[in-house]
Amino acid sequence: MSYYSFQDFKEACLSDQSNVIVMGGALKDADTCFSLSSRTELLDFIANDGLEELEFINTKDWEKNPDKTNPIKVDAYKFKTLYTLGYIAFLCNSKNKKWIIKSFKLSDDLNPTMRLAFQNPSLLKKENKK
């Protein structure tokens, strides 16, 4: 179960973009991997349902949290957009109420065809109709 409400995060991307921070690496990867070249483009993409087939992965402690007195959780999801598998990780700082997009990149699970084949073994059978 996710720590944060994805709907609350998405709503911030839609209506309160001043409360959403995108880390530099996430913005660079969003541009490189998804052609989302600005913070506004990325937030609009999230707010307008660009993250299809969203699937929660896990919640972890933010390892690189600069304020060790304020423990913060990070939620991670995988998603699909067109035929590309992506990964997003975000958090919310309870002290300043800012959402932070920590990661927005290609998913480590980049072979959906093989995954689908293993989920449906009948797809692996060759039919020779010669």
Image (cartoon, rainbow, N blue to C red):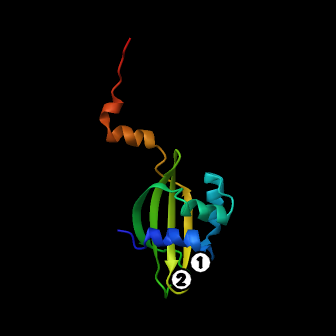
Q: Residue at image x 53%, y 78%? A: 65
Identify the residue at horizontal 52%, vertical 44% (top origin): 83
Identify residue type, mark 2.
Lys
Q: Position of residue 77 (x, y in %)?
A: 45, 61
Q: Quadrant of residue 50?
A: bottom right
Q: Are marks 2 and 1 in contact (CB under 8 Å)?
A: yes
Q: Nearer the viewer, residue 45 or 117?
A: 45
CA neighbours of label 2 inside 10 A, class few (<14), some (14 to 19), many (20+) = few
Give the position of the N terminus as an image quadrant. Answer: bottom left
The location of residue 22, given as percent across then percent down, is 61, 69
Q: Can you identify the residue that label 1 sits on? A: 19
The residue at 31%/32% (across/down) is: 122
Please state, as top left, top right, bottom left or bottom right, where the C terminus lies in the image: top left
**Percent x, y of residue 104:** 56, 61
Front residue of 3 and 40:
40
The residue shown at (61%, 73%) is 17
What's the distance in space between the residues labelled 2 and 1, CA to CA?
A: 7 Å
Does residue 2 appear left or right of residue 49 in this picture? left
Q: Hey, which quadrant is residue 66 in on the image? A: bottom right
In the rendered structure, find residue 97 and report the number of the disc placed on it.
Answer: 2
